[in-house]
Image: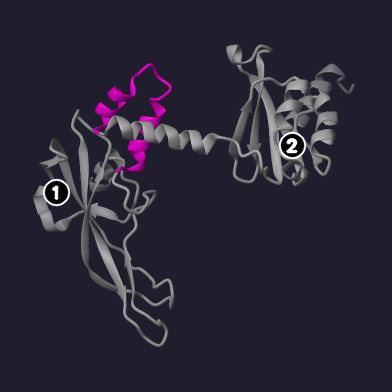
Amino acid sequence: MKNCTLDLLGIKDSHLEFDPKYKNKVIAAGFYQHKKVRKIHLRQSYPCACPVCGQKMRYNGFKTVEMLGLPSGGITNVFSIRKQKYLCPASAACPKTITKLAEIKDVKANDQISQAVKYQAISKLDQNISQKDIAADFGISGMTVMRFAQELSTYLRPNHHFLPQNIAFDDFKAGNFSSSGMSIIVMDIATRRTLDIVRSRHNTYLRSYFLQYDRQARWAVQTVTVDLYSPYRSLIHEIFPQALIIADRFHVVTHKLCLCFLYPII
């Protein structure tokens, strides 16, 4: 039951549990930044090895931090977390005393807003909702929503001085986004991360787009995975002269099946 409640609250870290110190009052009304909120008391403690000597660190008390969580029932949730402090005293294996603080999964150090709140706020940016209204929904400020948008923009902005060694691109129906109706998605095969969306699949447009990347970045590409669309071949040889062209296996199989139906073996 406890695990189900934590999951509904958007808590994914298996080391977080309801704080036994508060017994039957782990969830109570409280205040956060002069606003009435629902406070949820949690504790985080787990065995930790010293990053220097590798020995098990000693438990050294707790530090309480507060983190904003997803709202539920129209009320903002704030997690009050007692995080375990660790100590490895100076010894022959450790030249100096090492201290650590328990880390929450997917939450950066000193961050006071959970990743779940960030993701949900960002997901609403493409809707016809003002940043002020988004901020009110999640109990954050309008400037915080603006900062999330700027972080997303920085993350998605392509770096024209670098390309992964193994890339892939494929076309898809883009509707009004493209005058030709077809756009291109460019991906890093190793990380499966989308590098960019190119507005048109026409060779002249693709050529001018990829030439934005400097020569060193383009020559570092070793493989380009594409479908069987023949105009791509000459473009890839020109833009990525060091790259090996790999036919996407999905399109190879699809093409083979089409041939089997067109020219059945009797």
Label number found at residue 26: 1
* Disc 1 residue crowd, few under 14, some 14–19, many 20+, Cα 10 Å: some
* Prevalent SS, magenta region: helix
Quadrant in which the C terminus is drawn: top right
Using the image as rendered, state which of residue 201 and residue 144 is in the foreground: 144
Residue most extreme to the bottom: 92
Q: Indicate the position of residue 264 as horizontal and vertical percent values.
A: 86, 20
* Disc 2 residue crowd, few under 14, some 14–19, many 20+, Cα 10 Å: some
Using the image as rendered, state which of residue 256 and residue 216 is in the foreground: 216
Task: Mark 2 or mark 1: name the one nearer the start of the chain.
Answer: 1
Residue visible at 80% across and 42% down in the picture: 243
Report the amino acid beneath label 1.
Answer: Val
Label 1, secondary structure: give it.
loop
Residue 134 is covered by the magenta coloring: yes
Label 2, secondary structure: give it.
strand
Q: Dot 2 corresponds to which residue?
A: 225
